[in-house]
Amino acid sequence: MSDSPVQILIPAKNLPGDSNPASTTLREGKIFTRSFTGRFRNFRLLGAGFLTLLFFGTSWVNWNGHQAILWDLDTRQFHVFGTTFWPQDFMLLSYVMIIGALLLFAVTMVAGRVWCGYTCPQSVWTWAFIWAENLTEGDRNQRIKLQHAPLTFSKVFKRSSKHVLWLSMSIATGIAFVGYFVPVRELVQNLAHLEWLSSSAIWVGIVAALTYMNAGWVREKVCLHMCPYARFQSVMFDRNTLVIAYDAARGDARGSRKKTDDHKALGLGDCIDCYMCVQVCPTGIDIRDGLQMDCIGCAACIDACDDVMDKMGYDRGLVSYTSEAALAGEPEKILRPRLFGYGALIAIMLAALVVSLNSRELVDISVVKDRSVLYRYTSDGDVMNVYRMKITNKTQQPAQYNLKLHNAEGLSLSRTYQFTLAAGEVYDFPVTVEMKPLPTKEAGMVQFDFELVNSAAPNLVTREAANFMYPAQ
Ligand code: SF4
Ligand code: SF4
């Protein structure tokens, strides 16, 4: 802890072009975010760093010789660690998305905007781009000065370096993202061989351009004006939801002082009015103005203010996580009825997901009866019905199948149907079912099932209902 006078903690407040130094009403123009350290920043670095590694690394992981996670848009198959999901499995994806949304709602109700502040890609990439800006152009005050400096070689060099770094990060993001939809190794090879006019290369360009714009230029405006989740999440808040707030009772009256001053005797609170909390804020607001929609809950102001409090020898927590209830002196409740409601819904959806996963067929079978003729006769005088059958091997391994009839007394297949399908292969073929003529005065119909048996695992049986039509004799 330094013993120097507190004035060293008070930065220049009105550098030219500074949009967030002393006034929170200045919302136009560029925000120059000050770099800072602290426990919440470390927590974000850890969490966001892990998620970023997952994002960039997962598409490169192979599983049984295939890309572990790949949403193949051409074949409309979604491969996840050896399991393939087909368009018919869309319901499973819906369950996963609903569970994710409910989890997000529950977390938001308890902990406020932690998604926005710690894990939202817009925030994570914006912090990464601010880091690149800091690396190439210097910290906040140097960047403000550079903004207004005349065009010199040094300025051009710094600006160009920043944009080269931003563009590299954007292109890497584009490749990583598109690599979940086309095989990533193939994609990188094609890009390296300058095949830049393919649709996947164009998509890399589009994602890179959006990343460059959103994280480099638009930044907090996405959160403030474009993000729909930011608009409706206040509905999930209640009086016990964690928010980041300034303790006005402790901090006011604000004012600068020497560290050695007895500020209470001077009629001052703990806030030294240094504006550090404002200068680290990525949305450029002053948390001391009260709870605001524009606060994304990143906790940068907590880290900055805790640092100031440490230097002043005051207790931490002038800006802190709290709740409206705590601010009003009411007892805080973590377990609330709505939380149990979310928990029950999540449990129901999880159960539905598990049941659907367990009952999921690994082979898809569809049968259409030949509608042009109800029945025909074989050369032996038997009645015969013809069907069009389509079978899809939904696994990632080749499989051999036997086609049989089930609950089909008096019916038989015209021949043996045994075939092998490659992983993901679709087999479309005609099937003929026969019956000895029945001595009946009325035409009729027999209901039966086609039964497909996996030769390697006879307990894997898939059935599909069908009708057999016969004439009066
Ligand atoms: S007010 Fe604090 S928590 Fe809110 S966005 Fe600004 S720095 Fe982050
Ligand atoms: S709240 Fe903390 S960081 Fe913000 S101006 Fe006051 S002392 Fe400085």
Image (cartoon, grey):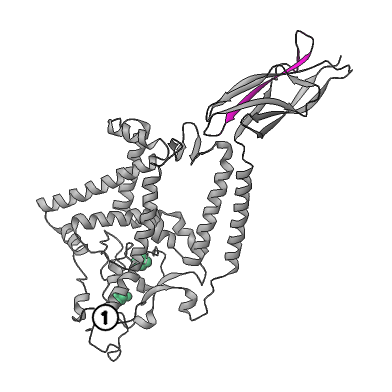
Q: Quadrant of the C terminus?
A: top right
| The image quarter in which residue 41 lies | bottom left
**Amino acid of disc 1:** Met
Residue at the top extreme? 379
Left or right, 151 with reference to 429? left
Magenta extent: 374-395
Can you see residue 351? Answer: yes
Residue at the left extreme? 152
Residue closest to the eye, 19 or 236? 236
x and y percentages locating residue 136 in the rendered image: 19, 54
Residue at the front extreme? 456
State ligand 2's quadrant.
Answer: bottom left
x and y percentages locating residue 376 in the rendered image: 75, 13
Q: Residue at x 63, y 29 (%)?
A: 455
Left or right, 400 with reference to 150? right
Q: Secondary structure at mark 1?
A: helix
Q: Residue at x 43, y 62 (%)?
A: 114
Q: Is residue 70 magenta?
A: no
x and y percentages locating residue 249 in the rendered image: 39, 82
Q: Which residue is mark 1?
A: 312
Residue closest to the eye, 461 or 360? 461
Q: Is residue 389 magenta?
A: yes
Left or right, 125 with reference to 456? left
Q: Residue at x 28, y 82 (%)?
A: 313
The answer as to whether callout 1 falls within 8 Å of ligand 2 is: yes
